[in-house]
Image (cartoon, rainbow, N blue to C red):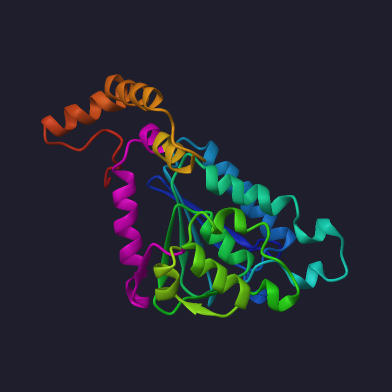
Amino acid sequence: MTPDRVLQVQVSRGVATLTLDSPANRNALSRAMRAQLGAAVRDALADDAVRVIVLNHTGRVFCSGMDLAEAAGGGVEDQGVREFPQLLEALWSSPKPVVAVVRGSARAGGVGLAAACDVVVAADSASFAFSEVRLGLVPAVISAVVLPRMVPHVAHRLMLTGEVFDAATAAAGGLVDLVAADDAVDDALAGLLTALAAGAPTALAETKRLLRAGSPLEFDDLLDLSARFFAGDEGQEGIASFREKRPARWVPTTD
């Protein structure tokens, strides 16, 4: 990795793995990290070969939040006021499933980064904290993606206290979806990616749009959507593959 490169990008078998790789500052959301991660997400969304996006990390910290060394004494631009919300929105509204893998600690904006993903896989030893209030700050931006995920009273307590909580608490509160033993995270991730790859790309995108909708669609709209997919190319291929007992053509091969 070059000195100014803080993100590793690898695309393999339909999965774009974006690995936060700046252990010196605990994978903080520095200007470089925000720029490189934002560009990598845009590239993955534009690449038809990419079916799933994974956020991973090196070192013992998933992401420590904003780079406070950069923000100290700076203006709003140093705080990523525009870049960070755009990054969260890109992950939240991505038509492709996004998975976060938290093997260590996540703090403040780092928790928001994970919460913006569709599925969060955490190691047993992972820890989380909304540390903003203890620094005289407010978890304002990340609340847009955290609050729809979490059990309200749990989010209230953890955001108000700023206390550190473990993966089990995060799962019980809705922040984390899957918790695995430290040495079993890769296996849990592999199983999840296999399951996601079994879904048809357009059907997954439309399903995610439904899941992210602010309010339920009318039944007439839902019936129309269902009918279009039954009659569409993916629906017909899915039905044929089921009847013929074979994988659908969108399922990645092992070749």
Magenta stretch, residue numbers: 175-204
Q: In this view, does 77 lie to the left or right of 38?
A: right
Q: Give the position of the C terminus as an image quadrant.
A: top left
Nearer to us in this view, 48 or 105: 105
Which residue is depicted at the point 19% across and 28% down? 239
Report the quarter where the N terminus lies: bottom right
Q: Which residue is drawn at 62% across and 73% down?
A: 160
- 197 left or right of 85 in image: left
Spot occupied by residue 143 in the image (x, y as percentages of width and height): 61, 58
In the rendering, at what x and y percent does residue 51 appear? Answer: 41, 42
Magenta stretch prevailing secondary structure: helix
Residue at 83% across, 58% down: 76
Is any atom of residue 51 visible in this view?
yes
Q: Is residue 63 visible?
A: no
| Residue drawn at point x = 88 percent, y = 69 percent | 73
Q: Does the magenta stretch include residue 202?
A: yes
Residue 120: where, in percent of width, then height?
44, 61
Q: How many marks?
A: 0
In the current view of this chain or complex, which residue is farthest to the front? 153
Task: Report the side of 86 relative to 195 (left or right).
Answer: right
Percent position of residue 172, x then y:
39, 69
Q: Is residue 254 magenta?
A: no
Q: Residue 31 appears in which quarter of the rendering? A: bottom right
